[in-house]
Image (tube, coloured by chain):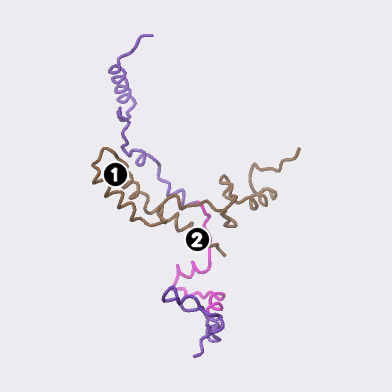
Chain colours: A brown, B purple
Amino acid sequence: MTKIGVLRDIKARKGVAANEIARRAYLYVARNQTLPPQVRYQAQLQLNTFGRYTRPTTVKNRCTVSGRGRGIMSEFGLCRFQFRLQALQGQIPGVKKASW
Amino acid sequence: MVSIAPSRLAALVKTRCTVFQTSYNPTSIRTGAKYLRARLRGPSMTDYYPPTLSLSSIIRQFPEMELVDAAEKQRLQDVEDRKKRGKGAPKKAKSKGSSFCNPVFHRSFF
Protein backbone atom coordinates (compact mmCIF):
# COMPACT_ATOMS: atom_id res chain seq x y z
CA MET A 1 0.00 0.00 0.00
CA THR A 2 1.42 3.32 -1.05
CA LYS A 3 1.82 6.03 1.52
CA ILE A 4 -0.16 9.23 1.00
CA GLY A 5 3.09 11.20 1.21
CA VAL A 6 4.47 9.32 -1.77
CA LEU A 7 1.28 9.90 -3.76
CA ARG A 8 1.46 13.60 -2.93
CA ASP A 9 5.10 13.68 -3.97
CA ILE A 10 4.32 11.98 -7.29
CA LYS A 11 1.57 14.56 -7.85
CA ALA A 12 4.06 17.35 -7.13
CA ARG A 13 6.65 15.88 -9.48
CA LYS A 14 4.13 15.60 -12.30
CA GLY A 15 2.90 19.14 -11.64
CA VAL A 16 6.40 20.58 -11.68
CA ALA A 17 7.24 18.80 -14.94
CA ALA A 18 4.01 19.96 -16.60
CA ASN A 19 4.30 23.63 -15.60
CA GLU A 20 8.06 24.07 -15.61
CA ILE A 21 8.44 25.90 -18.93
CA ALA A 22 5.60 28.35 -18.27
CA ARG A 23 6.90 29.05 -14.78
CA ARG A 24 10.41 29.66 -16.09
CA ALA A 25 9.10 32.11 -18.66
CA TYR A 26 7.20 34.08 -16.01
CA LEU A 27 10.20 33.94 -13.67
CA TYR A 28 12.40 35.36 -16.42
CA VAL A 29 10.06 38.30 -16.94
CA ALA A 30 9.45 38.91 -13.25
CA ARG A 31 13.12 38.89 -12.28
CA ASN A 32 14.36 40.87 -15.30
CA GLN A 33 15.26 44.38 -14.12
CA THR A 34 15.56 45.69 -17.68
CA LEU A 35 11.80 45.28 -18.21
CA PRO A 36 9.26 47.90 -17.03
CA PRO A 37 7.99 47.37 -13.45
CA GLN A 38 4.37 47.06 -14.65
CA VAL A 39 5.23 44.06 -16.81
CA ARG A 40 7.30 42.45 -14.07
CA TYR A 41 4.48 42.90 -11.57
CA GLN A 42 1.98 41.27 -13.92
CA ALA A 43 4.34 38.33 -14.39
CA GLN A 44 4.69 37.96 -10.64
CA LEU A 45 0.89 37.95 -10.29
CA GLN A 46 0.74 35.20 -12.89
CA LEU A 47 3.35 33.23 -10.97
CA ASN A 48 1.18 33.46 -7.88
CA THR A 49 -1.74 31.85 -9.72
CA PHE A 50 0.15 28.57 -10.12
CA GLY A 51 -0.87 25.88 -7.68
CA ARG A 52 1.03 24.51 -4.74
CA TYR A 53 2.21 21.39 -6.53
CA THR A 54 3.85 23.23 -9.43
CA ARG A 55 6.73 24.57 -7.36
CA PRO A 56 9.93 22.52 -7.34
CA THR A 57 10.37 23.09 -3.61
CA THR A 58 7.29 20.97 -2.84
CA VAL A 59 9.07 17.92 -4.24
CA LYS A 60 10.73 15.84 -1.56
CA ASN A 61 12.96 12.86 -2.09
CA ARG A 62 11.37 9.95 -0.28
CA CYS A 63 12.47 6.36 0.12
CA THR A 64 11.68 4.48 -3.09
CA VAL A 65 11.06 1.24 -1.17
CA SER A 66 9.35 2.21 2.08
CA GLY A 67 8.17 5.77 1.32
CA ARG A 68 9.85 7.17 4.43
CA GLY A 69 10.40 10.93 4.26
CA ARG A 70 13.31 11.28 6.64
CA GLY A 71 16.79 9.83 6.74
CA ILE A 72 17.09 9.45 2.97
CA MET A 73 20.43 8.84 1.29
CA SER A 74 19.90 10.67 -1.98
CA GLU A 75 22.64 8.73 -3.81
CA PHE A 76 20.58 5.56 -3.44
CA GLY A 77 17.07 6.96 -2.98
CA LEU A 78 16.65 4.81 0.11
CA CYS A 79 16.03 5.54 3.76
CA ARG A 80 18.66 4.57 6.28
CA PHE A 81 17.00 1.30 7.25
CA GLN A 82 16.26 0.10 3.70
CA PHE A 83 19.79 1.11 2.77
CA ARG A 84 21.14 -1.04 5.60
CA LEU A 85 18.99 -4.02 4.64
CA GLN A 86 19.94 -3.88 0.98
CA ALA A 87 23.60 -3.18 1.69
CA LEU A 88 23.88 -6.16 4.01
CA GLN A 89 22.25 -8.35 1.37
CA GLY A 90 24.82 -7.07 -1.13
CA GLN A 91 22.19 -5.54 -3.43
CA ILE A 92 23.88 -2.13 -3.61
CA PRO A 93 27.02 -2.29 -5.77
CA GLY A 94 30.19 -1.01 -4.18
CA VAL A 95 28.79 -0.80 -0.67
CA LYS A 96 30.31 -3.00 2.01
CA LYS A 97 30.06 -3.00 5.76
CA ALA A 98 33.12 -1.48 7.35
CA SER A 99 34.94 -3.24 10.15
CA TRP A 100 38.29 -2.36 11.66
CA MET B 1 52.45 49.51 -10.41
CA VAL B 2 50.97 51.41 -13.29
CA SER B 3 47.34 52.32 -12.74
CA ILE B 4 45.03 51.36 -15.60
CA ALA B 5 42.27 53.71 -16.65
CA PRO B 6 38.74 52.38 -15.87
CA SER B 7 37.72 52.98 -19.46
CA ARG B 8 40.50 50.67 -20.62
CA LEU B 9 39.36 47.98 -18.18
CA ALA B 10 35.78 48.35 -19.39
CA ALA B 11 36.97 47.99 -22.97
CA LEU B 12 38.83 44.83 -21.98
CA VAL B 13 35.72 43.32 -20.38
CA LYS B 14 33.68 44.23 -23.42
CA THR B 15 36.14 42.52 -25.72
CA ARG B 16 36.21 39.49 -23.47
CA CYS B 17 32.44 39.26 -23.69
CA THR B 18 32.50 39.31 -27.50
CA VAL B 19 35.27 36.68 -27.58
CA PHE B 20 33.58 34.25 -25.18
CA GLN B 21 30.04 35.11 -26.34
CA THR B 22 28.76 36.21 -22.95
CA SER B 23 26.48 39.20 -22.46
CA TYR B 24 28.14 42.47 -21.48
CA ASN B 25 26.57 43.63 -18.23
CA PRO B 26 28.79 46.27 -16.58
CA THR B 27 26.22 47.37 -13.97
CA SER B 28 25.47 43.74 -12.95
CA ILE B 29 21.77 44.36 -13.56
CA ARG B 30 19.56 41.29 -13.11
CA THR B 31 18.37 40.04 -16.48
CA GLY B 32 16.71 36.82 -15.34
CA ALA B 33 18.93 34.89 -17.73
CA LYS B 34 19.69 32.26 -15.11
CA TYR B 35 16.07 31.06 -15.25
CA LEU B 36 16.42 30.44 -18.97
CA ARG B 37 19.93 29.03 -18.77
CA ALA B 38 19.24 26.44 -16.07
CA ARG B 39 18.38 22.93 -17.23
CA LEU B 40 14.80 21.69 -16.93
CA ARG B 41 14.44 19.58 -13.81
CA GLY B 42 11.01 18.08 -14.51
CA PRO B 43 12.05 15.01 -16.54
CA SER B 44 14.54 13.78 -13.94
CA MET B 45 12.04 14.52 -11.17
CA THR B 46 9.33 12.33 -12.69
CA ASP B 47 11.80 9.43 -13.06
CA TYR B 48 12.58 9.28 -9.33
CA TYR B 49 10.19 6.51 -8.30
CA PRO B 50 10.44 3.18 -10.14
CA PRO B 51 7.28 2.34 -12.13
CA THR B 52 4.86 0.17 -10.16
CA LEU B 53 2.14 -2.16 -11.42
CA SER B 54 -1.16 -2.25 -9.60
CA LEU B 55 -4.31 -4.15 -10.39
CA SER B 56 -6.49 -1.04 -10.26
CA SER B 57 -4.33 0.80 -12.81
CA ILE B 58 -4.51 -2.17 -15.20
CA ILE B 59 -8.28 -2.32 -14.83
CA ARG B 60 -8.54 1.42 -15.50
CA GLN B 61 -6.29 1.12 -18.55
CA PHE B 62 -8.22 -1.73 -20.18
CA PRO B 63 -11.92 -1.19 -19.39
CA GLU B 64 -12.99 -3.39 -22.34
CA MET B 65 -11.48 -6.52 -20.69
CA GLU B 66 -13.92 -6.17 -17.76
CA LEU B 67 -11.50 -7.37 -15.10
CA VAL B 68 -12.68 -7.44 -11.49
CA ASP B 69 -10.63 -6.52 -8.43
CA ALA B 70 -11.91 -8.95 -5.82
CA ALA B 71 -10.34 -7.17 -2.85
CA GLU B 72 -11.79 -3.81 -3.88
CA LYS B 73 -15.22 -5.38 -4.43
CA GLN B 74 -15.10 -6.92 -0.98
CA ARG B 75 -14.07 -3.60 0.57
CA LEU B 76 -16.97 -1.74 -1.03
CA GLN B 77 -19.30 -4.50 0.14
CA ASP B 78 -17.96 -4.16 3.69
CA VAL B 79 -18.52 -0.40 3.61
CA GLU B 80 -22.12 -0.94 2.50
CA ASP B 81 -22.67 -3.47 5.29
CA ARG B 82 -21.27 -1.03 7.87
CA LYS B 83 -23.54 1.73 6.60
CA LYS B 84 -26.55 -0.54 7.07
CA ARG B 85 -25.54 -1.04 10.69
CA GLY B 86 -25.23 2.72 11.17
CA LYS B 87 -21.43 2.59 11.31
CA GLY B 88 -20.77 4.67 8.20
CA ALA B 89 -18.64 7.79 7.98
CA PRO B 90 -20.27 10.84 9.62
CA LYS B 91 -21.79 13.60 7.50
CA LYS B 92 -19.58 16.58 6.67
CA ALA B 93 -20.09 19.52 9.05
CA LYS B 94 -22.17 22.34 7.52
CA SER B 95 -20.64 24.94 9.85
CA LYS B 96 -17.77 25.06 12.31
CA GLY B 97 -20.04 24.95 15.34
CA SER B 98 -21.88 21.83 14.26
CA SER B 99 -18.65 19.86 13.87
CA PHE B 100 -18.78 19.16 17.60
CA CYS B 101 -21.00 16.20 18.20
CA ASN B 102 -21.72 14.09 21.23
CA PRO B 103 -20.67 10.55 20.29
CA VAL B 104 -23.56 9.04 22.29
CA PHE B 105 -26.19 10.80 20.16
CA HIS B 106 -24.25 10.43 16.98
CA ARG B 107 -26.02 7.35 15.66
CA SER B 108 -28.75 7.92 13.18
CA PHE B 109 -32.08 6.49 14.32
CA PHE B 110 -33.87 6.32 11.00
Q: Dividing the image into 4 quarters, which one contains the N terminus of chain B? A: top left
**How far from the left and from the top, in percent, is residue A79?**
61, 51
View extreme (front): residue: B97
View extreme (bottom): residue: B110
**Would residue A50 be found to the left or right of residue B89 on screen?**
left
Q: Give the labeled residue for mark 2.
A: A7
**How far from the left and from the top, in percent, is residue A93?**
63, 44
Specify the amino acid type for callout 1: Val
Rendered position, A73 above or below B92? above
At horizontal 48% and vertical 70% (from top left) the residue drawn is: B59
**How far from the left and from the top, in percent, is residue A71?**
60, 50
**Structural distance between the alpha carbons of marks 1 and 2:** 33 Å
Q: Residues within 10 Å of mark 2 (few under 14, many from 20)?
A: few
**How far from the left and from the top, in percent, is residue A97?**
71, 43
Q: Nearer the viewer, residue A41 or B74?
A: A41
Q: Nearer the viewer, mark 1 or mark 2?
A: 1
Residue range of the region highlighted in magenta in the rendering: B48-76
